[in-house]
Image (cartoon, rainbow, N blue to C red):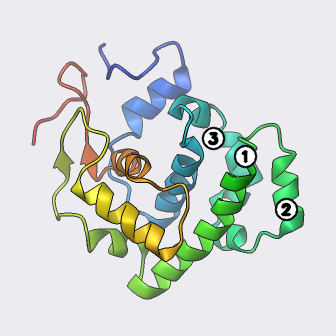
Amino acid sequence: MQRCFWCHTNNPLYIAYHDKEWCVPNFNDAYLWEMLLLESFQAGLSWECVLNKRQNFRLAFDNFNVGKIARYNDYKIQELMNNQGIIRNQLKIKSSVNNAKIFQNIQKEYGSFYAFLKTILPQEIIYETGKTHNEFSDKISYDLQKKGMKFIGTTIIYAYLQAVGFIYSHEKECFLFQAA
């Protein structure tokens, strides 16, 4: 069975992610936050590195509870810095706390993070391959940065939109390929 070129078939976690999660629409705010946090940790690293540590992130970051993360203090940040099971980048850890607060502000302003995204994204799923950004990831990234979020450049946001199913990018050779 042929998969997208980036899916390392020697990693069962990667295969499961590719086959059952990537590009599958899931617009629940809890999932949207989890993936935004994980994608922000990917900056400068491979997604496989983050994916392999996902369960450790889940445990370290209170099951991705945005409300709890928004209240993390210096003691909790130091605890995360000492956690060898996650990516221990202090800037990324601190930005996850900051981003959680902004995520909550967006939820209050728009009713949900999904509603915010839909003010920018088209109604239908975008089908495209071979890109690392588009006009929508550019705009969302710009707006989130303007609101104060960190580690959410256009390439990260594009990967995020693919991950949660706003953009469908399985390649023509992949058994999951679908045309628009």
Q: Earlier in the sequence, mark 1 or mark 3?
A: 3
* Residue at disc 2, secondary structure: helix
Res 171 quadrant in image: top left
Pointers 3 and 2 in contact (C-beta within 8 Å): no
- The one nearer the camera, 140 or 63, is 140
Above or below 109: residue 9: above
Asked whether, in this view, residue 86 is left or right of residue 177, the answer is: right
Can you tell which of label 2 and label 1 is closer to the viewer? 1
- The one nearer the camera, 128 or 54, is 128
Can you tell which of label 3 and label 2 is closer to the viewer? 2
Given the current orientation, which residue lies at the most extreme bottom position?
Answer: 109
Circle on res. 89: 1
Q: CA distance from mark 3 to mark 2?
A: 18 Å
Going 65% across and 61% down the picture, which residue do you hit? Answer: 95
Q: Position of residue 111 (x, y in %)?
A: 41, 83
Can you tell which of label 1 and label 3 is closer to the viewer? 1
- Quadrant where the N terminus sits is top left
Q: Which residue is mark 2?
A: 76
* Residue at disc 1, secondary structure: loop
Q: Earlier in the sequence, mark 3 or mark 2?
A: 3
Asked whether, in this view, residue 14 is left or right of residue 168, the answer is: right
Given the current orientation, which residue lies at the most extreme left position?
Answer: 180
Res 74 quadrant in image: bottom right
Q: CA distance from mark 2 to mark 1?
A: 14 Å
Going 72% across and 46% down the picture, which residue do you hit? Answer: 89
Q: Residues within 10 Å of mark 1 (few under 14, many from 20)?
A: few
Q: Which residue is mark 3?
A: 54
Looking at the rendered structure, the kind of residue marked 1 is: Asn
Asked whether, in this view, residue 20 is left or right of residue 152, the answer is: left
Looking at the rendered structure, the kind of residue marked 2 is: Lys
